[in-house]
Image: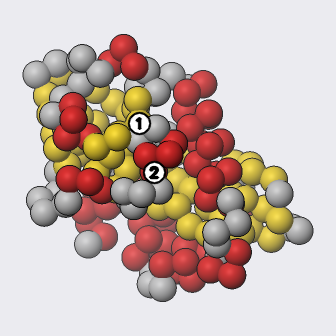
Amino acid sequence: MIIRQESKEDIEDIYALNEMAFGQKLEANIVDKLRDNCENLLSLVAVENGNIVGHILFSPVEIEGPHGVIKGMGLAPMAVLPNVQRQGIGTQLLERGIEELRKLRYAFILVLGHHEYYPRFGFEKASLYEIKCQWEGIPDEVFMILWLDKSMTEKVSGLAKYRKEFTDAV
């Protein structure tokens, strides 16, 4: 399997993949809107036998707090074709994304995700650092942060804000 940056030729396959993985068009539409409106995306695909079997997207997020606005990345969505799930494709996509974002010197990654999956990659509850999600009613255990720059843990707290494409889609 190859993990690589998405290309223009992948756009239709990524849309179909997200639609199949989530059983709806919402996530696929968010990916397309982010691609159209945001320059600082990290969009990776997993390719096996010439077919896209997985996709992960990272987009800019901000945490506004007493130390000002700190920029990081948000992970959403991550999708794997249903017939090849639980084979490590998501793990490989996430590990590669983390590696790339470290190289780009981002301070953190936020995720709204499964509380038993993401901690094995180092994600912790964001509330441990007094970081709150912009959307109310999000369970504490599913809103998590991964520190790529541990020196920032003392400097980052406050309200986490995702790009408007997420809010507009709901």
Of 59 and 133, which appears nearest the observer?
A: 133
What numbered label is drawn on residue 118? Answer: 2
| Other-residue count near label 2 (Cα within 10 Å), few / some / many at <14 / 14–19 / ≥20 | some
Question: Percent x, y for residue 152?
Answer: 32, 18
Observer-side mark, 2 or 1, equals 2
The quarter of the displayed image where residue 47 is located: bottom right
Question: Percent x, y for residue 17?
Answer: 61, 75
Q: Quadrant of the C terminus?
A: bottom left
Residue with the most extreme top position: 151
Q: Residue flagged by tag 1: what amino acid is it?
A: Leu
For the point 29% across and 21% down, the residue is 153
For the point 62% across and 34% down, the residue is 100
**Badge 2 or badge 1: first in the primary sequence:** 2
Residue with the most extreme right position: 49
Question: Percent x, y for residue 133?
Answer: 20, 49
For this view, does 30 lie left or right of residue 141?
A: right
The image shows residue 8, relative to residue 26, as above or below, that is above
For the point 10% across and 22% down, the residue is 66
For the point 74% across and 49% down, the residue is 4
Mark 1 sits on what residue? 146
Q: How many marks?
A: 2
One can see residue 11 in this view: no
The quarter of the displayed image where residue 129 is located: top left
Q: Residue flagged by tag 2: what amino acid is it?
A: Tyr
Label 2 with label 1: CB-CB less than 8 Å: yes
